[in-house]
Amino acid sequence: MSAVLLAVPTALAACGGTTNSAVSRLAASSSRTPAPTAGLTSSASLPPVVVSDSGGSTFEVSASPVEAAIVVNVNSFLWSAAPGQTFLVDTLAVKNATAGIESLSDFDDLTSGLAKDVSFVMSANSAAPLGYSSDCGIDPAYPPPQCTISFGQGLTVDNDSADHDNRSAVMLPPGSTAQITLSYGPVLASVAPTKVSVYFDGGVSVPTDLTP
């Protein structure tokens, strides 16, 4: 993982007065001391879903249920949510299901520090009372009933077990699995993680729900 947290687009609508942008992380308290993600609510991982990325590589992906955390660890920095806010966090187990070495760039783009083809999504029914109705249909890959609340900011890659911090593309040998932790926020604490799904939309005509 790169030690530099790069800027990402901030063209995401605000949620009930909460700024959903990478800039909001800079306003959160930080530390150079590495530490695990804190304040998580956890449960068992779901069965894997087979997806193909934009380059045609096939992966088996298992997504944990989305969780809420008051602190996340990004590139050895601790980011703390303000009172009444949390971060949304998810961990993907990404297995290379091919016979060759494959790039994880769709899940971990070192240029931006984002999982560029993974999104946090709500249904329109859940998004409206939480202030995310303006995100419904804003991403052309998703129909209006699906609200990509992470569109614009993107999901930050907090940790990737296959990234050895050498700034080269993250590659995954055949049959091996990478654990990739992603986060988004801060968001209002009223945004229940159980209302959020994880989708993959790289190289496919219809985005794939990783948390069925």
Image (cartoon, rainbow, N blue to C red):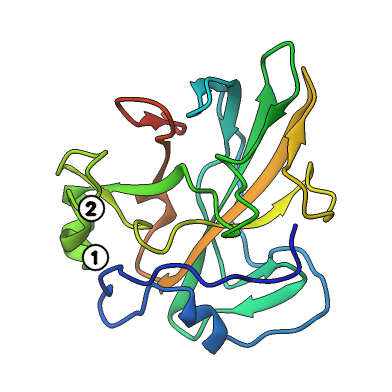
Check disc 2: other Cα within 10 Å, few if <14, some if 14-19, many if 20+. Answer: some
Q: Which mark is residue 205?
A: none
At 55% from the left edge and 55% from the top edge, which residue is drawn?
114
Tag 2 secondary structure: helix
At 23% from the left edge and 63% from the top edge, which residue is drawn?
132
Q: Position of residue 55 (x, y in %)?
A: 53, 26
At 72% from the left edge and 44% from the top edge, which residue is drawn?
169
Q: Position of residue 79 (x, y in %)?
A: 63, 77
In this picture, is 4 found above or below 157? below
Seen from the viewer's position, the closer of residues 162 and 189 is 162
Q: Which mark is residue 130?
A: 1
Circles 1 and 2 in contact, beta carbons < 8 Å: yes
Amino acid type, residue under disc 1 in the picture = Leu
Q: Quadrant of the C terminus?
A: top left
At 68% from the left edge and 25% from the top edge, which residue is drawn?
95
In this picture, is 123 found above or below 167? above
- Determine whether, in the image, residue 38 is placed left or right of residue 139: right
Seen from the viewer's position, the closer of residues 130 and 160 is 160
